[in-house]
Image (tube, grey):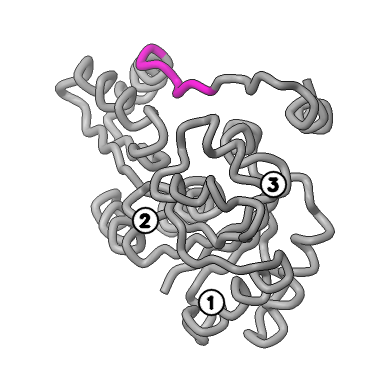
Amino acid sequence: MDKATFMRRLRSERTLPKTAAPPPELFVREFARLAPTGEPILCIHPSSEISGTVRSALTARQEFPGADIRVLDTRVVAAPLATLVQLAVQMAAAGETVDVIEARLAGLIPRCRLYFLVATLEYLAKGGRIGGAQALLGSVLQIKPILTLRDGRVEVLERERTHKRALARLQELVLTQIPRDGSGHLCVMHADVPEQALALAEELRGPLNLPPLPIFDVPPAIVVHGGPGILGVSFFV
């Protein structure tokens, strides 16, 4: 089904669809294709705390003891993961070695900041990805939490009373934390709220004197757990 149909059904159906990490067999197939070239293989994957992708890659790697296969747990998901992949591609195209690329990405991982709002905590609770945000469930109607990824898990950063205040605080966090030299790789992400994402991007790029910001659609495998209405930012400090 297309994304619009998926979003419509996600909002209306009582039972959430399940997600699953790619099985080791898929990695074995790719490694078998790439390993004969003799080139190193760098796998850049979402946080092992909320996805089994890293585990599948590590399992498959055991089938190729003679290959240089490196599995990187980025400890993030969504937009910052995309940024790390894009940076790796750019560095490879510029002729950097796999050692340099891996080291630079590893250095960026602890500097990543990901902040996001959700329309409801219902999806995170049902999907089991709520982490330290579990304590919010009893007061979900009274607060609008700003969530983050901490040690690869979804945690509560702050609580606000209204969506407007939460959004203003989200912008303040970016403007006070991001480097002012353009090195922060700031981007915006959303799940089925493109107008809000565009407005947020415009609000942020002006004070920072940046070109138009990348705006990423949060993919269905993440929307299942966060729900429609996700609006967030990611950058590196």
The residues bearing labels 1 and 3 have C-alpha atoms spaced at a distance of: 21 Å
Characterize the local packing of mark 1: few (<14), some (14-19) or many (20 or more) Cα atoms within 10 angstroms.
some
Instruction: Indicate the secondary structure of the residue bearing disc 2.
Output: strand
Q: Residue at x 29, y 56 (%)?
A: 106
Residue 157, x across and y down, in percent: 46, 64
Up-down: is 46 above or below 84?
Answer: above
Which element is circle 3 on?
strand
Question: Which residue type does callout 2 highlight?
Answer: Arg
Q: Residue at x 30, y 21 (%)?
A: 36
Q: Which residue is mark 3?
A: 217
Cβ–Cβ under 8 Å for marks 1 and 3: no
Mark 1: which secondary structure?
helix
Question: Viewed as shown, does residue 221 lie left or right of 150?
Answer: right
Q: Is residue 4 above or below residue 235?
A: above
What residue do we see at 49% from left, 73% from top?
A: 184
Residue 118 image offset from top left, x and y in percent: 64, 51
The quarter of the picture where the N terminus appears is: top right
For the magenta stretch, what is the residue range? Answer: 19-25
Residue 173 is tagged as: 1
Decide if residue 53 is on the left or right side of residue 63: right
Between marks 1 and 3 in the image, the one whose residue lies nearer the viewer: 1
* Residue situated in front as seen by the camera: 59 or 226: 226
Query: Is the residue marked by circle 2 packed among few (<14), some (14-19), or many (20+) residues within 10 Å?
Result: some
Q: How far is disc 2 from disc 1 in space, using C-alphas?
A: 16 Å
Q: Are marks 2 and 3 in contact (CB under 8 Å)?
A: no
As rendered, which of 151 and 74 lies closer to the eye? 151
Query: Which disc is residue 150 wearing?
Result: 2
- Looking at the rendered structure, the kind of residue marked 3 is Asp
> Is 82 positioned to the left or the right of 212 in the image?
left
